[in-house]
Amino acid sequence: MIHPLQSHMPPAMRDFLQTHTPTPFVVIDMDIIRKNYRSMHTLYPNTDIYYAIKANAEIPILQTLHAIGASFDVASVGEIDRVLKIGVSPHNISYTNTVKKAEEIAYAYDKGVYRFTYDCIDEIQKIAENAPNTQVFCRVMVDCDGAEWPLSRKFGCEPTYALPLLKRAVDLGLQAVGIAIHVGSQQTTTTAWHKALGQVKSIWDTAKAQNIPLRILNLGGGMCCHYDKQIIPHRQYASAIMGCIRDLFGDDMPRLFLEPGRSLVGDAGVLKTEVITVADKTGQKTHPWVYIDAGIMNGLFEALDEAIKYTVISPDELTGHTVQKQSLQKQPCVLAGPSCDTADILYDNISLPSDIRSGDMLFVLSAGAYTSSYACAWFNGFPPLKTYFVDSQKYDILTTERTTERNTTWHKNP
C-alpha cells in the first residue's frame, strides 16, 4: 500500500519535515483536519460531531475545530477547562468518561456541562446527587471484533442490564435521553456496527415502550485513519452505518452523536525521528536492531504489542526519490525506542533501508492521534514530544511548540 501521505503530502508539511528542527516531533497540517471534519459533517447528516479530544488535545487543533462548528467529547475536568478556555459553550461539551469522581461531576455541572455518560448504578447515583436533572446516556457494551484498538470490557454495561439502568436514571430525576456505544477504535469492518446497532434497537424499543423517552443515539467513534493497510473508504463506511440506522429506525430516526478522534486528526500528522543506533547483534549483518529517538514511552505508545502498525518511511520515500531510483533496497529490522525499558520495542520485523545508519531520519505517517497525548513527561529524562503546526490552506507555517512550561507561536512566510 502506498500511504496517502506519501503520495499526496501537502507541500507545507513536506517542507517543514525537511527542516533541521530537532527530533522527535510531530507536525500537524491544520487544513487536513478541517477537510476531515467537513467531510464527516457531510457524510453523517443530522449528526452532532463531538471531537474526542483525548486523541490530540493541542490548543490549535481545538481552536480550529471550534471555529468550524465542532462540539467536544471530554474525559476529565482538565479537558473541560481546556475547551472552556478557548470559548466553547458548556452546552457543546459531553462528559463521556464512565469513571468520574463525585467532585468532578459537581465541577462539570457548576461549569454548565449537562451531558454525562454512565454504565453502572454507582455512577448514575453520583450524577443524580451532583448534577441533578441533567441529560444522561447509558453506555452499552458491544462487540469490538475488527477493531485494532478494542474498547470492550472496560466500558459499558451488558445489553441485558441497560433497561434497569435507564429506569434507575429516570427514578433519580435525570433525563435518560439516550444510549451510547463504541465499536472499538480503528474499527476496520462495518459488520461490528450492524451487530451493535441491532442490539441498541432492541433496547431502544423496550425502553420507549416503558415510557423512557430516548431520543439520542451516541455512536461513539471508531472511524479509521490510514496506517499500514487499505481501509474502507470513508464514504462507503458512512453509507453502511447510516443505511443500517435508517433500516432499523425508519421514520423514528434518533438524533445522532458522533465522537471521532483519530479519524479527524490521525492522518493530519507525521512524526519525524532520528536513528540513534543500528546494532548488529549477531555479526551476520542480518535483522539489525534500529533504535530511534521516539518510542513507546515518548510518542508511539499505540505500537505497544504492535497493536497499531504505522507506515514508516525514509527520506527518499518522503521526497519521491524512490520513483527515480525505481526501487529502494530494504531489509527486515527490529525497531525500538530510546528508553531503558524492555517494553520499548515497536516492531520485531519491519522493512527499513538496507543502508540505514545512525543519524538517518525516519518518518512515521498518520501520527496525528494518540502520539503527543500518550507521551510520558520526562520518562528516563527524555523531554516531552514536541508538536508543530502547518496550514497548507494558506501555505503559512504556523508552528506551536509544546513544552511543559509554555506554548510559543511564531509565523514564517515561505
Image: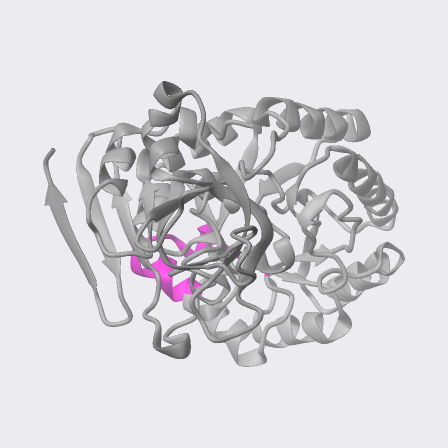
Q: In which quadrant is the N terminus drawn?
A: top right
Please report the bounds of the magenta region as a residue range: 79-96
Q: Is residue 209 left or right of residue 316?
A: right
Q: In which quadrant is the C terminus drawn?
A: top left
* Residue 385 in sight from this viewpoint: yes
**Which residue sits at x=10%, y=36%?**
413
The colour scheme used here is one colour
**Which residue sits at x=33%, y=26%?**
321
Q: Between residues 400 and 302, which one lies in front from this camera angle?
A: 302
**Which residue sits at x=20%, y=30%?**
395
* Residue 95 in sight from this viewpoint: no
Determine if the magenta segment contains residue 81.
yes
Instruction: Identify whether 55 is placed above or below 224.
Output: below
Number of marks in picture: 0
Q: Is residue 95 left or right of residue 212?
A: left
Q: Position of residue 126 (x, y in %)?
A: 65, 76
